[in-house]
Amino acid sequence: MRYDDHDPRPNDADRAGSERVKDLLVRLTGERAMDRLDALDPAESRFLEWYAREARLTLSVAERRKLKQGADRFVREVRTRRAVQRLRVREIAAEPESAPAWEEGTLSQVLTSAARARYAPALDLSVAAGAGRELWDEPCDRWIPLPEGSPDGRYVALRVTGDSMVPLLHDGDTILVKLGDEFVPDAVVVARVPDGGYVVKRVGGIAGSRVELTSLNADYPPIVIPRDPSLVLGTVLLRWCIHGTAAA
Amino acid sequence: MRIERRHETGADAWTDQEVVQRMRRDDDVAIREFYYRFTPVLWREARRGRVQPALRDDVVNDCLADSALHLMQPNVPIPANLTGYLVATLRHRLANERRAMKRREAAGEAATTHGHAERVVREVCSEASIRASAGPAAETPPLSPVLERLSRVVDAGISAEERQLLRWVSASIPQRLIAEWLGITHNAVRVRVLRLRDRLMDVALRDASPWKPGERDALYEFFRRSGLSERARRALDVGRARRSPHRRGPPSSRPPVEKEDQ
């Protein structure tokens, strides 16, 4: 006999009992063995391929439906985040540290001294969103130190509002803008729309004397402005975002 | 229907590496195929990892989308075993999430211990109320501490090869396929599986020393309910007094009643 029961001749019930216990032990210990699986071990690749195929083939009707519904959403999400990834705007997942301005004055007055001290004067972009307001004339009382690795130049830090650039920028994020007057395709720029104030957009296309500025949020239509360097404030190099990772 | 389109485009015949290569060229069909191919296995892993059903889709989707974006970068090498890579990624995320949750719980505990906030003492709550307060996460109740420990003891007593075979057997892989993977005959696999099952039983009942008396009783109950009583009783050295009242038999088999000293 295999098991040392008191009766030297185990009956069917005894055998069934011990087989049942073995089944339970296989299930019980099998789960732990799965937990201890080293998924990156090449020796397990055949098993994992089989495991993945089995998972696909044994989906319930409801899971199949959910899979179908989720596919389009997944493709959209990956494409949008891929577009964000290509924009090459660095992210710092925190609020920027700011300090009281060393000098009082409007943006145009403090810009040079802030750049010399490697600071960016901070402003709220919404104050200059309306037509007729010039960013340069806004007083700024806070400066933000330039993050390490920022190339030399003149910068301004702007707090953005709205959701037209989601998932790159969220309402309340702060962006670091390197001042300059170039329209480069695929760059994210802060531009002044004639009679429309300042906007943050991606340069979608440049054709002759016109520039198309696009939003990342498909709900917002593109804006076409003249190809006039004086309409460009600068290029967005970095964002301080506390809304989770927008791009991997 | 998208599933049918997989066959039309031939996407289901692509290797995992081809799928990633095409994704790098921004091919929507490949991105969709990536999702179809790996979502079910990650769902299964998330279920095994006891992720709440309400959060499962988001956890799997985030993991898959982050991995897709990482793999789509041209300078990133494509893993030879993509399923293993994604399973390992999800497991790391779940482990990190569990660690973070423990830290949050510890912080909450510290905050309430020294403050005046009302505390819930887990030990005085019924299992049903704990399960109800855990929400949908409690759909699969966790193993009892004794069975959890039993699985640990058995796992520690088997070799790496036995563990691998156990993994395959518990995943219900056909024995013919196992024979093909191991390069042995089907009959040899059958023998190995039988030996493995015997070995699990032997390891489980080999040594009663790690078990405290209360745990031995619980374990004995587990074996007894499953149909194995005599061997389990002897192996675990459970007192006869415990089982005798439930058994019918001659009076001599009953435990002697100890009389109190006058």
Image (cartoon, rainbow, N blue to C red):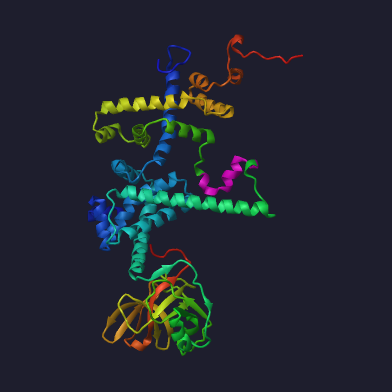
Report how many numbered discs are placed on residues in the image. Answer: 0
Residue A197 vs B220, above or below: the answer is: below
Quadrant for residue A38, please give it.
top left
Give the residue displayed 39% in from the left and 24% down from the top.
B198
Q: Is residue B6 left or right of residue B116?
A: left
Residue A76 vs A187, above or below: the answer is: above
Task: Write down the region rendered in magenta.
Answer: B124-138
Q: Quadrant of the C terminus of chain A?
A: bottom left
What percent of the width, then of the height, locates residue B256?
Answer: 64, 13
What percent of the width, then of the height, locates residue B43?
Answer: 40, 48
Residue A90 vs B155, above or below: the answer is: below
Q: Residue furthest right?
A: B262
- Does residue B135 show up magenta in the picture? yes
What percent of the width, then of the height, locates residue B146?
Answer: 53, 33
Majority secondary structure of the magenta segment? helix
Q: Is residue A186 left or right of residue A139?
A: left
- Does residue A197 show up magenta in the picture? no
Instruction: Tell me, yes or no, if residue B261 can be seen here.
Output: yes
Residue A32 vs B5, above or below: the answer is: above
Q: Residue furthest front?
A: A117
Quadrant for residue A22, please give it.
top left
Give the residue displayed 66% in from the left and 51% down from the top.
B113
Instruction: Tell me, yes or no, if residue A134 can be seen here.
Output: no
What percent of the width, then of the height, locates residue A49?
Answer: 30, 44
- Viewer-closest of B247 and A167: A167
Give the residue displayed 65% in from the left and 53% down from the top.
B112
Quadrant for residue B35, please give it.
bottom left
Q: Quadrant of the N terminus of chain A?
A: top left
Q: Is residue B76 left or right of residue B249?
A: left
Q: Is residue A53 left or right of residue B104?
A: left
